Image (cartoon, grey):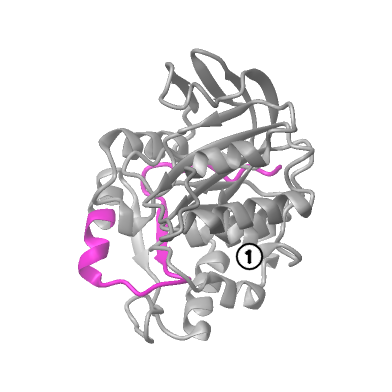
Amino acid sequence: MIIPPYLKSGDKVAIVSTARKVSEEEMQPALSLLNEWGLEVVFGKNLFKELNQFAGTDGERAEDFQTALNDPTVKAILFARGGYGTVRIIDKIDWSEFKNKPKWLIGFSDVTITHSHVHKLGIETLHSPMAFNLLKATNESKQKLKDVLFGGNLQYEFPENIFSDINRKGEASGQLVGGNLSILYSLLGSSSSIDTTGKILFLEDLDEYLYHIDRMMMALKRAGKLYKLSALIVGGMNDMKDNKVRFNKSAEEIISEAVAEYSYPVLYGFPAGHVRNNFPLIFGRKISMKVDVDSSISFG
């Protein structure tokens, strides 16, 4: 995998939205933080446009993304927020300049579409808080984001967690891929759907009905995305909903059941996704992980 150049003081970072609309006020915390880090921030020219829930038309959102990708002075692209909309523009993007001069693409949630698409181009991306989320992100997650963008080592160690009863012990290594479960499910059968064979899959999600978590896991399983994994990491599974006729299992229990027949290690409760402590993950990077009483993840 190609590693985009790490940032240095004075580098320019573009903020664009490929999905939901944002206000200038909502972008101020990200602007201030990046300036603190010694980075110059530029906004996409259409960033504050509105079309219903979107940050402008599909064409306007694609234009901002394409402009940032093609601009040689822009060294990283921080997505403004998720929601819905990236899938509407992903096939409008010309990746030629980006493949010649890669840069960090930073975000999560709906940005999973971009992570998956770019993974197939052989370029690493960064799953982490976006501009909209930085106001509420913990200091620790913001510091780790800065560290990784400026080339620091990334390693996580965890003592016994609340999911120790369903964690599956073991050691594994492989490229890290994944993101939002709902998005990965929506990409099945498309040109952006990733090959997970021999890789470590990360999953997170928010605000889904529990039966739908089961449906999506069954779809991934039937599509062959689960049985040849090297390992599985499960992040935040927050604000799940149940019907009056209850499904009566947690999201973690549903996932555990879906992968019960496989033998690879599984770590639940990793602090990433729709949580304040949204730790960065380098997608495409080979990692080593150990799941035990004390678990760890190291990025190569």
Residue 24 is left or right of residue 41, and the answer is left
Farthest residue in the front direction?
Answer: 245
In the image, 10 versus 55, the foreground residue is 55
Q: Residue 266 at what x, y percent from top left?
A: 61, 29
Q: Which residues are magenta?
A: 1-30
Where does the image place residue 14, in percent across and percent down from the top left? 42, 62
The reply to whether residue 73 is visible in this rendering is no
Location of mark 1 (residue): 186
Q: Image quarter for residue 170? A: top right
Query: Percent position (x, y) of residue 44?
Result: 40, 72
Determine the image quadrant of residue 30: bottom left
Magenta: main secondary structure = loop
Give yes or no for residue 28 being in the magenta stretch.
yes
Q: Per the image, is 48 magenta? A: no
* Side (left or right) of 297 relative to 40: right
SS for callout 1: helix
Task: Classify 70 as above or below 226.
Answer: below
* Residue under the point 31% across and 71% down: 22
The answer to whether residue 202 is seen in the rendering is: yes
- Residue drawn at (27%, 57%) of the image: 31
Q: Along the line of sight, which residue is nearer the eye, 8 or 290?
A: 290
Q: Amino acid at mark 1?
A: Ser
Please name the residue shown 46% across and 33% down the image: 270
From the top left corner, tell me how far across and down residue 222 is, in percent: 77, 53
Q: Quadrant of the N terminus?
A: top right
Quadrant position of the C terminus in the picture: top right
Q: Is residue 131 left or right of residue 66?
A: left
Q: Is 227 on the left-hand or right-hand side of 166?
A: right
Q: Residues within 10 Å of mark 1 (few under 14, many from 20)?
A: some
For the point 26% across and 36% down, which residue is it?
Answer: 139
